[in-house]
Image (cartoon, helix red, strand yellow):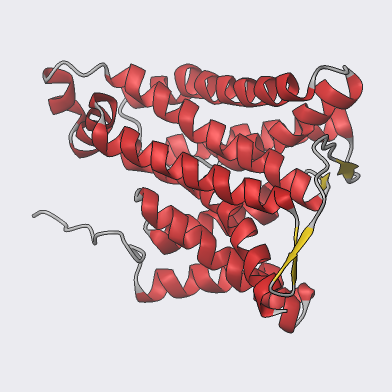
Amino acid sequence: MHFQQLINGLAVGSIYALVAVGYSMVYGVLKLINFANNAFMVAAAFLLILFYSTWHLPYGLAIILALVLCAAGAVFMERASLNPIRKKNAPGISALICTVGYSTVITNLLLYAFGSQTIMVPFVLHLPTFELWGAVIDPFTLIILGTAFVLMVFLTWLTYGTKTGEAMRAISQNTQAAKLMGVDVNKIITLTFFIGTVCAALSGIMIGIYYSAVDTTMSFTIGIKTFAAAILGGIGVLHGSLVGGLVIGLLETFVAGYISAGYKDAIAFIILILVLVIRPSGLFGKPVQSKV
């Protein structure tokens, strides 16, 4: 029983971690909370349903198209709205509200197109379950864990082992200095939104498959959990997002299994409040020093 809950918690936590990575990547470069991340996450699952179940496209192609369209939507948001806001040196709250606006628009478009009811998410890879140490393991759970691990390794290498990652870190420290050093700031920012949204969209598809269903309210319920995961680990820190997502997923699963499923959604809020009160910078974040 304990091992079963552990496996389930790791799977859910890995999904949360991928969305939290999307938050952290954008915040690490722009110091901006991209609340549209949640909407793109859910939109990817609905697009998979549209492309595969309605348009009857091949399953793999449907997933790729869903990821690309969500990432393209994030790039459009950045170039059409956030970039002009930055050029006008508007307060940071302006860009944040802009992402909230995009999230609301996308969520309402999904409501208009698919309705408010829960929709089944298709999955074509039906593999037999197996038993390990008394726990029934679904192979898709291992796929989730493997995907999260591979993506985290790739993103860590991209951030700390490539010129692109060096440019991202330079922009996060001083945008003007990065420009003077020849960094194409707009290109790097656009790439950051693209990668972060692909991670969020992929997690949306995986969580839809994991629960076999999706609905528009997931953009809030799962979105707040993944945001709490990013805050817990230290927003802007990739490995912090991984740890934060796993902690949230494990706590949620054990609460649902041993106390009550009705309380599991409160865990993210409790953790978010505690972290903000005790350590606002998160587990791996560094406190910001105010310069006089």
Res 133 seen here: yes
As displayed, is residue 158 above or below residue 131? above
- In percent of the image, x 68 and y 53: which residue is there? 141
- In percent of the image, x 28 and y 25: which residue is there? 164
Quadrant that contains the C terminus: bottom left
Q: Nearer the viewer, residue 265 or 155?
A: 155
- Find the residue positioned furthest to the bottom: 259
Q: Residue 230's x, y, as percent?
A: 46, 55
Q: Nearer the viewer, residue 156 or 105?
A: 156
As displayed, is residue 231 above or below residue 143? below
Q: Is residue 175 left or right of residue 190?
A: left
- In percent of the image, x 48 and y 35: which residue is there? 196
Q: Is residue 44 left or right of residue 82?
A: right
Q: Residue 278's x, y, as percent?
A: 37, 76
Q: Residue 137's x, y, as percent?
A: 73, 60
Q: Residue 61's x, y, as percent?
A: 72, 19
Q: Is residue 278 left or right of residue 34?
A: left
As displayed, is residue 207 above or below residue 262? above
- In percent of the image, x 78 and y 25: which residue is there? 59
The answer to which image quadrant residue 157 occupies is top left
As displayed, is residue 186 above or below residue 228? above
Q: Nearer the viewer, residue 181 or 21?
A: 21
Q: Nearer the viewer, residue 116 or 8?
A: 8
The answer to which image quadrant residue 84 occupies is top left
The answer to which image quadrant residue 270 occupies is bottom right
